[in-house]
Image (tube, grey):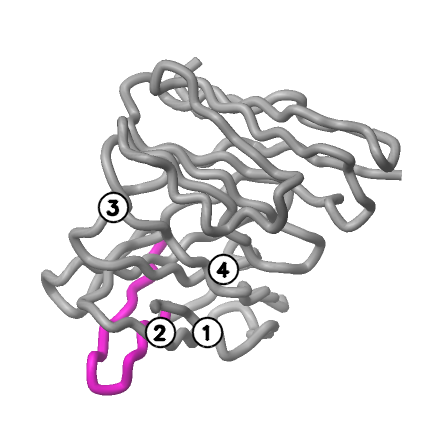
Amino acid sequence: AQSVTQLDSHVSVSEGTPVLLRCNYSSSYSPSLFWYVQHPNKGLQLLLKYTSAATLVKGINGFEAEFKKSETSFHLTKPSAHMSDAAEYFCVVTLSGNTGKLIFGQGTTLQVKP
Amino acid sequence: GAGVSQSPSNKVTEKGKDVELRCDPISGHTALYWYRQSLGQGLEFLIYFQGNSAPDKSGLPSDRFSAERTGGSVSTLTIQRTQQEDSAVYLCASSPQGTNEKLFFGSGTQLSVL
């Protein structure tokens, strides 16, 4: 069975400093992995996705994530945080090429301090 | 409209009553999901419809929960004999085909069981 673990429930950074949101997955098959963002009082939005192509995936708003099979990780990073990045971030896993369900992590709240 | 539409946006009900939540996916999208998001929690998978295939109901928490999708379009999530622990935001999402594609989320239905 596949599952996903977000290692930090809350991350706080200063504006202009790097962001690292950690995600580990467990899957018996080659997974597809996603990061979604949920801003306060707004719907969920896809940031980026990995589907067995390049291991370094670039998304919107300057975010990127690297798929590391040996570490079963898919951490989300951004070189320089902006105040508008404050939101809830979800790591998501599903089986590659399968039309099965997407499993969401518990979420990481990103706080950006001025 | 162009997006996923959910109704009602808010529903307050008394314990023991039945409720129906509606989801209108984006036209032409064959995949439809229901998730539940409790306060401060991640998204809990409930049920997944994909085309004419039998739905994946593995996330439904009890037999009080059921869902149907008529004509491959509109979906209704029904909760019978509601309990206070059913209080949550119920999110619907659709995608063009399967789970390797971007999910488009509705704004959700905030259900409060008194």
**A75 in the magenta segment:** yes
Q: Which mark is residue A89?
A: 4
- Cα separation between marks 3 and 4: 23 Å
The CA distance from mark 1 to mark 2 is: 6 Å
| Quarter residue A14 falls in | bottom right
Q: Which residue is mark 3?
A: A99
Q: Do dots 2 and 3 share one subunit?
A: yes
Query: Which residue is pictured at 57% across the width and 30% down the height?
Result: B77
Q: Which residue is mark 1?
A: A5
Q: Which residue is mark 2?
A: A25
The quadrant of the rendering that contains the C terminus of chain B is top right
Q: CA distance from mark 2 to mark 3?
A: 18 Å
Q: Looking at the picture, which amino acid does disc 1 mark?
A: Thr
Residue visible at 55% across and 47% down?
Answer: B60
Q: Which residues are magenta?
A: A61-76
Question: Mark 4 or mark 2, which is nearer the start of the sequence?
Answer: 2
Q: Earlier in the sequence, mark 1 or mark 4?
A: 1
- The amino acid sitting under disc 2 is Tyr
Locate residue A25, reporting x and y percent: 35, 74
Q: Are marks 1 and 2 in contact (CB under 8 Å)?
A: yes
Q: Earlier in the sequence, mark 2 or mark 3?
A: 2
Q: Is tag 1's residue or tag 2's residue first in the polypeptide sequence?
A: 1
Say which label, 3 or 1, has the lower sequence index.
1
Which residue is situated farthest in the left direction here?
A53
Element carrying mark 2:
strand
